[in-house]
Image (tube, rainbow, N blue to C red):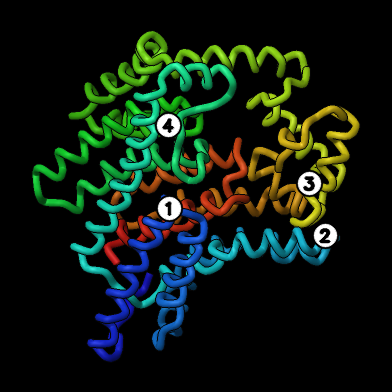
Amino acid sequence: MTACKNRGNHGRAQWKDKAIFASILLMIAGLFLSRAALSSSVILFLLLAILDRDFKKAWRRFSSNLFFPAFTLLFFLPFFSGLWSEDKNQWLDVVRLKLPLLFFPLAFAGCWQLTKRQWQWVALVFLGGVFAGCAAGLLHYAFHPDEVHAGYLRAKTLLTPLENDHVRFSWLVSVAVIGCFFFRCFFETRWINTALLVLAVFFVLYLHILSARTGLVSLYLFGLLCAGNFLLRKEKKAMSFLLVALLVSLPLLAYFFVPTFQNRIRYFVYDFSFVKKAAYLPGANDGARVMSLKAGWQVLKDHPLGVGAGDIMHEADKWYAVHVPQVLPTDKFYPSSEWLIHGAVAGWPGVLIFTFVMALPFFYQPKQHRLSWTAFHVTAAFSFLFDMGLEVQYGIFLYAFITFWWWRLASGE
């Protein structure tokens, strides 16, 4: 991306940069406080970052890298599907929810710049928020172990932030593990770098206690990428084999020594027995997910050009009515795959466009820290394969914010 030079009045630029820094910290705090706090801080950040005298320069930065404008397709695809959506109210709700996918690329292409010290604080506040969320859940677990253990046999997990959204939070913790290694490059202080390693170990242990598959698989994908990276470096081959051995032994150790992990496995086997028989089990986690995938696939087959963002559930309901008429309303939700959702929105062209956007980060990489960048986007693509992360506020914010925050960090801008 081209640099912004001659930013105008130096005093005004300094004030603007400080305000943007404060708004970024508020967004991270809002993530763990409430939806309203998150929405307010996002609006503040976008206004500060986009409404600027140097907008033309920011636009040139935005348009100079294909990844930035391509990312906005995640907004424009559902937006233009309003042309063939019958339920305009639902379509409008979807479009409003996805506005950050349009504005975050523009905001992070803006002609503002934080100091190294400020970026360090952003990283520490981010990791501190994730740590506090983990600690709160573990504290509740410590005082109510029997209740928690029983809950794991009924598709429940530890209490988590993000309004108890354990899927998104588990992915966020796996991203925090990647971040602990990524951020070490920006700190010269030895004790901070040591603390980041200790924090990474804590997050790894927490993910096994939480036992949410999205976070665990994302963690193991990161471990495999690191092992592959070590294998390519002759002096690190032994580290590669040690890491693979650790990845194999961790789930085995967790099964024997972590009750929540063991109960999660037991519930998964129980739940999956109904999935194999195509039998409906009310309140089942995997059963509801598989039903939503079948419904989404049927919508795509019946409508190869899509039904629009406003009519996905209306069409999915037709599948439920035929195949599982007794299903509870709480067990019906959007297809649990962003590929199927984009297929329902715009048919096979939507599937191809979404695949294109998901693939671009691996071809348009920042100059440095490519392992962290690649690991983040591998875990994001995996989570979207079996989750509707871009249909909820927290998922949209996390993907858009972390993507462009890490881009600026890795690009040194």
Q: Residue 33, which numbered label?
A: 1
Q: Amino acid at mark 4?
A: Leu
Question: How far apart are labels 2 and 3 at the CA level?
Answer: 10 Å
* Residue bearing the label numbered 3: 313
Q: Which residue is mark 2?
A: 87
Q: Residues within 10 Å of mark 2 (few under 14, many from 20)?
A: some
Mark 2 residue element: loop
Left or right placement of residue 3 versus residue 53 in this view: left
Question: Of callouts 2 and 3, which one flags the residue occurring earlier in the amino acid sequence?
Answer: 2
Q: How many marks?
A: 4
In the picture shown, does residue 122 fall above or below 320? below
Residue at mark 1 to residue at mark 4: CA–CA distance: 29 Å
Mark 3: secondary structure: helix
Q: Name which of mark 3 and mark 1 comes first in the sequence.
A: 1
> Is label 3 or label 4 in front?
3
- CA separation in Å, label 1 and label 2: 32 Å
The residue tagged with tag 4: helix, strand or loop? helix
- Residue denoted by label 4: 221
Nearer to the camera, 281 or 61: 281
Quadrant in the rendering for residue 221: top left
Q: In terms of sequence position, does the residue under pointer 1 or pointer 4 come before the other?
A: 1
Q: Are marks 3 and 4 in contact (CB under 8 Å)?
A: no
Other residues around mark 4 within 10 Å, as few (<14) / some (14–19) / many (≥20): some
Can you name the residue that lies furthest to the left here?
190
Residue mark closest to the camera, 1 vs 4: 1
